[in-house]
Image (cartoon, rainbow, N blue to C red):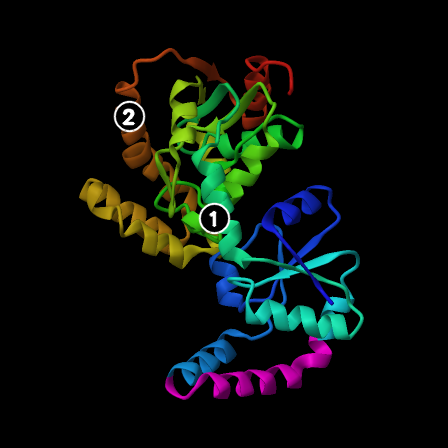
Amino acid sequence: MFQDITIEQLLARRSTGELTLIDVRSPSEYQENTIPGSLNIPIFDDAERAEIGTIYKQVSVEAAKDRGLEIVSAKLPTFIKTFAQIQGPKAVFCWRGGMRSKTTATVLDLMGIKVSRLMGGVRAYRQWVVATLDGLELPPAGYVINGNTGTGKTLILRRLQAEGYPVLDLEAMAGHRGSIFGHIGLHTNNQKSFEALLVEQALMLQGSPYVLMEGESRRVGKAVLPDCVVRSKESGTQIFIELPLEERVRHILEDYQPMQHKDELVQAFKHIKNRIHTPIAKEIEANLLIGQFDRAVKLLLEHYYDPRYAHAMSQYEGERIVIEVNTIEEAMEAVKEHLPVKA
């Protein structure tokens, strides 16, 4: 018989790297919100789940169960084979730890594949995230990377993180770069997914004497920063990076890969077009349409992003560390000089 485990047991076992988590809900449910790091092996796809739900509401519970059994039976060999290919201990979950995860665990147990089932499912995990976030404290010192659009703030943080520095990558958690074009080429996370990733990353930084983050606004894409992050950001040491315009344009083109996302860029530009002087806005749009992205980006920086950033900085009265460099690589090395020894 399969074993039921609590969220605390699941987190403890996963922290040692000994447990693979498997979400058996439909693909759309998985995309909406899941436990970070889990795999998706759905017992029903989206269409099947919708069909069973309709039968449940319009016919009867028993009819829905019969249809569910019919669907599962047809795909059972492939379903079992998929699980059998995953080595090591496994735990399955659904929304509330109900029928789908119970059916999966029971069938796998009958076939000799041992799995655990998370009691309470994703809902229990979400309750843990909310409770943990409510009492979350970040490391006592914060270092905040600021700079005009295109100064490579996120790239610098990710390179520092790869070297072992304590970083909260808020844009990665949000799946968004924080601008009107920030969603392009990315999967944007909702608030629940953002908070789950934030809690798990923040807990990994417990014991670190400081934390690095980017000088984001309160909202990043669909996600709103919690108070503990805002407090750390506002009270932290502010590092401002200044790069030549040409280097910023180069980095933006490298990051966004505009040739692959031309239509999305044009569509996103329409949301800010009316905020830019009409002749300039027309020139930017024309350059986007003909693929002159370097010219379009340069104009956007000069006539939209830089003036907005300059206005925001004019309101800032705190002390700041200003780093003037020629490349992002130089900027990263300069940032290191202002940080304590790695945690």
Residue bounds of the magenta highlight: 58-79
- Marks 2 and 1: in contact by CB < 8 Å? no
Counting from the top left corner in percent of width and height, residue 135 is at 46, 32
Residue nearest the viewer, comparing 194 with 186: 194
Residues at marks 1 and 2, CA–CA distance in whole angstroms: 37 Å
Counting from the top left corner in percent of width and height, residue 282 is at 25, 48
Image quadrant assignment for residue 39: bottom right
Which residue is at a point 38% across and 29% down the rendered structure image?
230
Number of the label disc, if any, that sits on residue 56:
none
Which residue is at a point 49% across and 66% down the rendered structure image?
28
* Left/right of residue 2 with respect to residue 221 in the rendered view: right
Marked residue nearer the N-terminal end (1 or 2)? 1
Compared with 329, 263 (above or below) is below
Q: Which residue is mark 2?
A: 312
For the question of whether residue 203 can be seen, the reply is yes
Q: Residues within 10 Å of mark 1 (few under 14, many from 20)?
A: few
For the question of whether residue 175 can be seen, the reply is no
Secondary structure at numbered mark 1: helix
Amino acid type at image mark 1: Gln
Counting from the top left corner in percent of width and height, residue 25 is at 55, 67
Compared with 290, 56 (above or below) is below
- Given the current orientation, which residue lies at the most extreme top position? 319
Compared with 143, 158 (above or below) is below
* Left/right of residue 85 with respect to residue 236 in the rendered view: right
Which residue is at a point 76% across and 64% down the rendered structure image?
114
Amino acid type at image mark 2: Ala
Compared with 317, 54 (above or below) is below
* 60 in magenta: yes
Q: Residues within 10 Å of mark 2 (few under 14, many from 20)?
A: few
Q: Which residue is mark 1?
A: 127
* Left/right of residue 163 with respect to residue 34 in the rendered view: right
